[in-house]
Amino acid sequence: MASLSTVEQLSLCGDEPCGRELLSHEPHPAALERRGVEPGKARFIIDVVLAIHRRAMPRWLAEPDTTLAQVMAQAAAELREVVAPPAPTIR
């Protein structure tokens, strides 16, 4: 089985809030820490996921033919472009 990305891992909530329930709960780094993620990295992951979610949610609500997963993936791709732009080509 292929390994899951961090965002996909956050979707596998177990006993914690999932799906729409997350809209009413502040994600907590302790949930990731219990899965072995270092505390500082856990807070960073939560912050990044929340930023992606804030970017995607208005689009999802405005575009009824798209899924939340699609707009979350688009927002994550936009973040990757900003944080790690493609290397310049050498001529």
Image: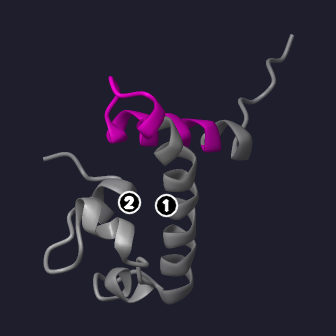
Q: Which mark is residue 6?
A: 2
- Do the residues bearing badges 1 and 2 touch, measured as CB atoms within 8 Å? yes
Disc on the earlier residue, 1 or 2: 2
Q: Which mark is residue 49?
A: 1
Q: Which residues are magenta?
A: 60-79
Residue, x 37% and y 33% (percent of image)?
Answer: 70
Foreground: disc 1 or disc 2: 1
47 vs 55: above or below: below
Judging depth in this view, the residue of 23 and 38 nearest the camera is: 23
| Residue under the point 32% across and 64% down | 10
Task: Give the main secondary structure of the magenta stretch.
Answer: helix
SS under mark 2: helix
Q: Type of residue at label 2?
A: Thr
Is 69 part of what is drawn in magenta?
Answer: yes
The spot of residue 7 in percent (x, y) is 38, 56
State the quadrant of the C terminus.
top right
Looking at the image, is 72 positioned above or below residue 27?
A: above
- Left/right placement of residue 26 relative to residue 64 reads right
Question: At x 27% / y 60%, what residue is drawn?
Answer: 20
14 or 35, nearer to the observer: 14
Rendering quarter of residue 84: top right
| Left or right side of 34 for 46 | right
